[in-house]
Image (cartoon, rainbow, N blue to C red):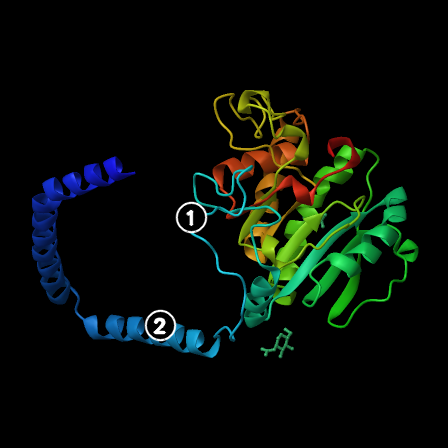
């Protein structure tokens, strides 16, 4: 400890001169830049006025939306909340594990946003059978205390069970077309979500959570999962090296990922984000699948392969641990 401190201070001393000169150069440059702007810009006043207005708005919003006094255990800088798992990605996105967050604090924060959360789910053909448990358990555990719209896509609206919803929650039943192959049912979800994001969701909700229907919520799933773009770690691949992930490996496919690339293997069963980001993701995946179809190729794990490709090049801002997607097989 002492040794590393000494090394640090030694470095600091040595670099003092360069830092000072950088500062000076910076000052001179910014002065020149400023004069340049003044002389170049015919109307600098309007731009400056715009900027200060934006800052003013930001300022007043922050003042309006102040967290109330909340008492909670102090976070300890020298004591990580979990030692056994990775808590943050190399691009600094948090990985959400139980025991790393305070639900009450997060709920307070999100209530300031007054956000509405959309939960999309597809129940086609015999999958309507799963809706009862899905909805019952979602009412018990999903985003409790927040406004939720369930968007249920189905080819059999009459088979959607009646479920008593809590206040602030509603169910929207949307007609969707079924397909002969389950692969097509799975893949077409991307197209449907992207269409509806543009036409409807953007005006109705702030976040979208896209889930498989054959799941059961067995513990709270709350606002800790929300972020502009989130994916979920597939429980089956935690110990795998990237070259053994189930990525699409044929370069002819749009979902192709070379063996020396890839961060994690994400499940297609749970992802989401802001409506705009989900729109971008689903549209990109749908387009990639259409190109594959035209080229006579289908990715190994269908929409999940394309999701993995998208999330490799558009890094998620939050990642859900497999705690959000355990099943009996992986417990
Ligand atoms: C919160 O959002 C709802 C629905 O969008 C709206 O009716 C309500 O007025 C909003 N409340 C506040 C305090 O902004
Ligand atoms: C999605 O929108 C496109 C363009 O409007 C349309 O051609 C397509 O049929 C729609 N697909 C679905 C599944 O609604």
Residue beneath label 2, please? 54
Q: Would you say 43 lies left or right of 230 here?
A: left
Q: CB under 8 Å between callouts 1 and 2? A: no
> Which numbered disc covers residue 143?
none
Residue drawn at the location 7% of the way across and 48% of the way down: 21
Q: Would you say 284 lies left or right of 41 here?
A: right
Residue 268, image x, y percentages: 67, 39
Mark 2 neighbour class, 10 Å CA radius: few under 14, some 14 to 19, many 20 or more: few
Q: Would you say 327 lies left or right of 130 here?
A: left
Residue 39, image x, y percentages: 10, 65
Q: In this view, does 103 lie above or below 287?
A: below
Determine if the C-beta at disc 2 is less than 8 A from ligand 1.
no
- Where, by quadrant of the figure, is residue 307 drawn? top right
Residue drawn at the location 42% of the way across and 51% of the way down: 77
Question: Considering only order in the chain, which callout, 2 or 1, is on the residue closer to the N terminus?
Answer: 2
SS label for mark 2: helix
Residue drawn at the location 52% of the way across and 45% of the way down: 316
Residue 18, image x, y percentages: 9, 44
SS label for mark 1: loop
Q: Nearer the viewer, residue 112 or 11?
A: 11
- Where, by quadrant of the figure, is residue 49 drawn? bottom left
Residue beneath label 1, please? 78
Mark 1 neighbour class, 10 Å CA radius: few under 14, some 14 to 19, many 20 or more: few
Q: Nearer the viewer, mark 1 or mark 2?
A: 1
């Amino acid at each position: 400890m002492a040794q590393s401190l000494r090394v640090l201070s030694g470095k600091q001393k040595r670099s003092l001169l360069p830092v000072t000169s950088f500062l000076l150069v910076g000052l001179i440059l910014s002065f020149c830049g400023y004069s340049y702007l003044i002389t170049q810009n015919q109307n600098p006043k309007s731009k400056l006025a715009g900027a200060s207005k934006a800052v003013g708005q930001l300022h007043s919003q922050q003042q309006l939306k102040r967290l109330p006094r909340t008492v909670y255990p102090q976070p300890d800088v020298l004591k990580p909340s979990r030692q056994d798992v990775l808590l943050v990605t190399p691009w600094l996105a948090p990985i959400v594990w139980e025991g790393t967050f305070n639900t009450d604090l997060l709920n307070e924060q999100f209530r300031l946003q007054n956000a509405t959360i959309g939960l999309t789910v597809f129940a086609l053909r015999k999958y309507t059978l799963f809706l009862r448990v899905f909805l019952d358990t979602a009412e018990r555990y999903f985003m409790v205390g927040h406004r939720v719209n369930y968007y249920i896509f189905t080819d059999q609206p009459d088979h959607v069970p009646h479920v008593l919803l809590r206040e602030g929650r509603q169910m929207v039943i949307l007609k969707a077309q079924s397909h002969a192959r389950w692969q097509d049912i799975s893949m077409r979800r991307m197209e449907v979500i992207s269409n509806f994001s543009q036409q409807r969701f953007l005006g109705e909700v702030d976040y979208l959570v896209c889930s498989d229907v054959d799941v059961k919520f067995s513990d709270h799933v709350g606002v800790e999962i929300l972020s502009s773009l989130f994916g979920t770690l597939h429980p089956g691949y935690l110990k795998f090296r990237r070259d053994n992930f189930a990525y699409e490996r044929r370069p002819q496919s749009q979902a192709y990922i070379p063996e020396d690339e890839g961060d994690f293997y994400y499940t297609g069963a749970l992802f989401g984000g802001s409506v705009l980001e989900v729109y971008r993701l689903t549209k990109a995946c749908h387009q990639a699948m259409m190109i594959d179809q035209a080229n006579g190729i289908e990715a190994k794990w269908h929409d999940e392969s394309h999701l993995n490709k998208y999330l490799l090049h558009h890094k998620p801002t939050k990642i859900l641990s497999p705690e959000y997607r355990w099943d009996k097989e992986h417990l």
